[in-house]
Amino acid sequence: MSLPVSLFVGFRYSKSRSGNAFISFITLFSVAGIFLGVMALTIVSSVMNGFEGELKKRILGVIPHLVITAPLETVNHWQPALAKNPLVQQIAPFLQVEALVQSPRQLTGVLLQGVTVDALPHFMQQALIVGDWQQFSLQRYSVLLGRGLAEQLEVSVGDSLRFMLPQAGSYTPMGWVPRQRLFSVAGILETGSDVDKHLAVTNLSDLTRLAGGNNTQSQWRVTLTEPFSAPQLALKLASEQQLQVTDWRQSQGKLFAAVAMEKAMMWLMLLLIVAVAAFNIVSALVMMVTDKQAEIAILKTLGMTDRQLFTIFAVQGLINGVIGAVTGVIVGVLLCWQLNPLLALLGMQLAAGITLPVDIQFGQLCLILLSAITLTLLAVWYPAKRAVSINPADILRDE
């Protein structure tokens, strides 16, 4: 099948190695710039995706995605409909309070969660590094501590801690006395995040007895398949079901907002590198248009339309951009695939046993490729337009 004449000439120009050596150098330089920019954008984006995914798994694996507070008698009104939502993975009774914990040597504030062992998030089940969930469920007034919290309190399994709830208590002749109770440390949790420094987990029934007071309101923990969809679902439940709903953003929103901002800024800075390389194509094509004025004039004299002439130079510039972008994505993916072994080979590992998380997302690769090609299209517009504006009579007058 024969190509249209404009595409045929454009491909011939792009394959040609004869002519001005400086133009060839500028073209090669621009293609190499696009290649390096796209490769760097692919690697950095994949690492940032992996970092965000690790944070999501380790922090939102133990922090409730949604907490619903509602009267116990209303549970049959909203729970069946919510359970059918494809975003909802699990709904379980739950209680979370702020508490003070005192060891023989230290006193600090913690986030005390009351859970049922048969309805734990998957990551929390795996985070227990010392102890056993079944023994924990059978032992009354036992508690699991985050590793960082256990180190701060200088306690280990079997030690006793005093938990105090400042928001629940009673007045005595000595004044306000918070509810308090001795708990036995039954295990250690490790999430690999700062949550370890503030997390304590106990049985729901024990925490309910300790909290006492208002039994008309109950809490449920809602675990979602995609934690980032929690804000939209919370708004929907609050408006449609008239429920009191809080989501993970109240405790971890600033952290993930900072990560998203950093990810966006890294994307923008690396995309600017691609843009600079893409606009180097302008220099190469402008010089080529100037160098080939006579050929352009002859083609226009032979009847080539402005659209066909525009296509010739647009195709030539676009081919260079596509080559740089496609090879950049391919090499970037290959380097991501072997990134940690390469860092180990170069002696640039973060620490022994610690690897960079990498998450290659196909949709993001397509967006990177499309962005680079779009910048190339913008870059070739001016040279192609300049070629169209050439007047054959002025060029061929002295030939």
Image (spheres, helix red, strand yellow):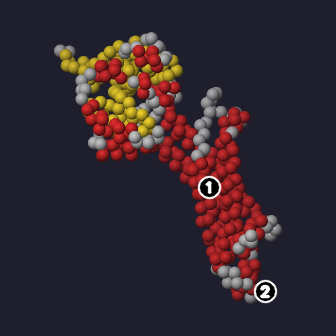
Spot occupied by residue 77 in the image (x, y as percentages of width and height): 29, 38
Q: How many dots with numbers?
A: 2
Spot occupied by residue 85 in the image (x, y as percentages of width and height): 40, 42
The answer to whether residue 334 is visible is yes
Please identify the quadrant where the C terminus is shown: bottom right
The answer to whether residue 269 is visible is no
Residue type at mark 2? Glu
- Left or right relative to 99: residue 331: right
Spot occupied by residue 159 in the image (x, y as percentages of width and height): 43, 11
**Residue at left 35%, top 13%?**
182
Rendering quarter of residue 336: top right
The one of 71 and 131 positioned closer to us in this rendering:
71
- Left or right relative to 136: residue 334: right
145 in relation to 371, above or below: above
Residue that label 1 marks: 369
- Left or right relative to 196: residue 101: left
Residue type at mark 1? Leu
**Residue at left 76%, top 64%?**
24
Q: Secondary structure at mark 1?
A: helix
The one of 381 and 206 positioned closer to us in this rendering:
206
Residue 399 - label:
2
- CA distance separating discs 2 and 1: 44 Å
38 in relation to 312, above or below: above
Spot occupied by residue 94 in the image (x, y as percentages of width and height): 36, 28
Rendering quarter of residue 63: top left
The one of 165 and 65 positioned closer to us in this rendering:
65
